[in-house]
Structures are given as C-alpha cells and as structure tokens.
Image: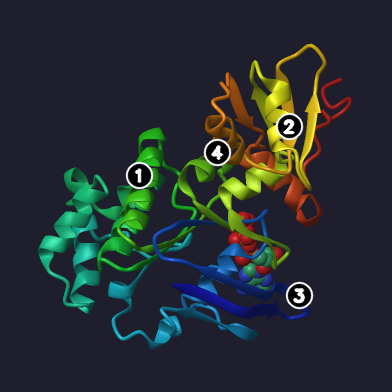
Amino acid sequence: MIRAHALTKRYGDTTVVQDLDFTVHPGTVTGFLGPNGAGKSTTMRMLLGLDAPTRGRATIGGRAYTSHSAPLTEVGALLEARSVHPGRTAFHHLMALAHTHGIPRTRVEHVLDLAGLTAVAGKRVKGFSLGMGQRLGIAAALLGDPAVVILDEPVNGLDPEGVLWIRTLLRDLAAQGRTVLVSSHLMSEMALTADHLVIIGRGRLLADTTVTEFTTTAGGGSVTVLTPRATALSELLRGPGIDITTTPGSDRLEVRGTDAERIGRTAAAHAIPLYELTPHTASLEQAFMDLTQESVDYRTTTAAPTGALA
Ligand SMILES: Nc1ncnc2c1ncn2[C@@H]1O[C@H](COP(=O)(O)OP(=O)(O)OP(=O)(O)O)[C@@H](O)[C@H]1O
C-alpha cells in the first residue's frame, strides 16, 4: 500500500503540497485528481523519491521508495516527463531496464505484447508518436511485475482504443490485488476506471472517498421511486432522518436519508412492485467542479471575447 504522512513540499516561499495524509489500498484503482497546479505530480514525485519532502513522509509497502533494493519489481511508475534515449529501439530500451534488475528477455517480450508494441519493437523511439511513447512508458512500468503501480496521466495522447486498453489494464491490475494510483484530467474516464478517489486542491486534501459516495453525495443523495403502492411503501420507509416527498395523485416518491438498496429490500420484503428505483448521482465531472471550484488557480471564462473580430 502507498501512504502519505503529513507530506509537505515547499519551493521557496510557496507551499505546493501541504500536510497530505492518505492511503492507497491494494485491489483498487485509486484516481488522483486535482485542478492544474494542485500538486499531483509533485506528490507522485515524492512518493517515488524523486523530490524530497520538506516535511512528512511517503512510504510504499511501509518503506520509502529509495530504500527498496529492486524498485522496478516492487513499484512500477510512469511520470509525465519521459527519459527514453531517442536513438534506442523500444526493445532495447526495455532490455536495458531489464538488465538492471535481472529481468529475462521473455518478460520484455511479454510487456511489449501487453502494450501492443510488438510490431514496432525494433523501431527507434524518436519516431514514436505521443501515444506509442505512453504505451512504452507503461510497458516499462510493468516490466518488473510490480505490486504497486503509479501512473501520471497515462491516457495522455492515447487514441480511443488506447484509452480502452488502459481502462481494462488498470482494472485487471487491481483485480490481481495490485495497488494502482493514477492521475488524470479526464473525469469521464476516471468515473469508469477508478473505485476510489484522492482529490487535492492547492496542495491540500479535499476528498478521500469512493467514486460512488462522491457522486451520490454531490447528486443530493435522493432516490426516485415509482410504485403503484406509494402510500404503503412510504409508511414502511418512514423513520428518523428519512424525508419522503410525494406528489398527490402520482405513484412517484422522492426519498432522502436512505439508499436505493434499502428501499429495494424493503419493497421486496413486502411484495411491493417497483417500476423505477433511481439514485440521483452527479457526474464525476460536475462533482469534481463543485468540490474544487475554490481551489482552481487557472480558470477560463465562458464568455466570448467581445469585439475581437469587429
Ligand atoms: N521545481 C519546481 N519549482 C518551483 N515550483 C514548482 C516546481 N515544480 C512544481 N512547482 C509548482 O508546484 C505547483 C504544483 O505543480 P504540480 O506539477 O505538482 O501540479 P499538478 O497537480 O501535477 O498540475 P497539472 O494538473 O497541471 O499537471 C505548481 O504551481 C507548480 O508551478
């Protein structure tokens, strides 16, 4: 598991990461989100020992990254800035990394195949597109078959097939029990990929929650129920903290203070038919915008420029 303890980074007078505490658990994909400049890359760099924290600690599997003896086999990482020798082929780049850890050639061939790069393995990296470069970076991150995977914006530059590939790959890695931390600006993609979210704004923790809880809370937490026995069901659901709005002459209920599962179970237990049971959730994008609106450093206006072309 990955842990940040009071993690803080200052550059001169500016604090870019402040007192961050969070844990990333195995078996889940955790999305690491925040507006531009929130401190995501800085945090990831500190997790990987590439930046020293001003204060606090980052550990992976209970130890600092730099104290792992064979880091590639324990932590696989893709950061935004790539350091691939442009004159090397994809195969030689991965073989050079493999040699440092005694990783066999068969594993290099396996990750090339996994990343869809087998056909271009003999091509020099300088001729690679952005998406091919991303695939190579991900292949390198997975080379040592690590239990922990940290990826900064992995879908950058990928085409729709590549985006789907990453989504499936990350879900598979988590299903195998690995710890997966991934940053992205693509909220719709994160909604499909992540189970858990760590959200920061201006270097501070804003939320550490599940995707479901985050979007349900932002949606107001109400559930619409359509049933021919609306009165009977509302009597059964009534209780402390539960608010039910009925529309006279209608079979529709708006229920707050409980969830769709409990409503469905109560209805089933009393053989009450349900025609609709809809929890209201916000989109991840809307929930994210609502949460981070105070922490956005770089904002555009939606108003059209006036008189520019007049
Ligand atoms: N080496 C550095 N020296 C000074 N300031 C830095 C340095 N590295 C990052 N920063 C500043 O720290 C802040 C956080 O940057 P960081 O790249 O971690 O944010 P981010 O959340 O990854 O942003 P983005 O979503 O735009 O990639 C920014 O204001 C950035 O300008």
Where the C terminus falls, by quadrant? top right
At a point 65% along the width and 56% down the height, the residue shown is 34
Q: Is residue 93 left or right of residue 67?
A: left
Whether the residue carrying mark 3 lies under 8 Å from ligand 1 is answered with yes
Where does ligand 1 appear, by image quarter? bottom right
Image coordinates of residue 221 in percent, x first then y, are: 71, 41
Q: Which residue is mark 3?
A: 14
Cβ at disc 1 under 8 Å from ligand 1? no
The CA distance from mark 2 to mark 3 is 57 Å
Mark sitting earlier along the chain (4/2): 4
Residue 283 seen in render: yes
Q: Secondary structure at mark 4?
A: helix
Q: Is residue 180 above or below residue 157?
A: below
Instruction: Please name the residue that numbered disc 1 is placed on.
Output: 168
Q: In the structure shown, which secondary structural element does the residue marked by tag 1 occupy?
A: helix
Give how far across and how far down residue 24 sits, in percent.
Answer: 50, 67
Label pair 1/4, CB-CB below 8 angstroms: no
The three-letter amino acid code for the residue at tag 3 is Thr
If the image is split into quadrants, where does the N terminus sit?
Answer: bottom left
Mark number displayed over residue 235: 2
Residue, disc 4:
188
Q: CA distance from mark 1 to mark 4?
A: 15 Å
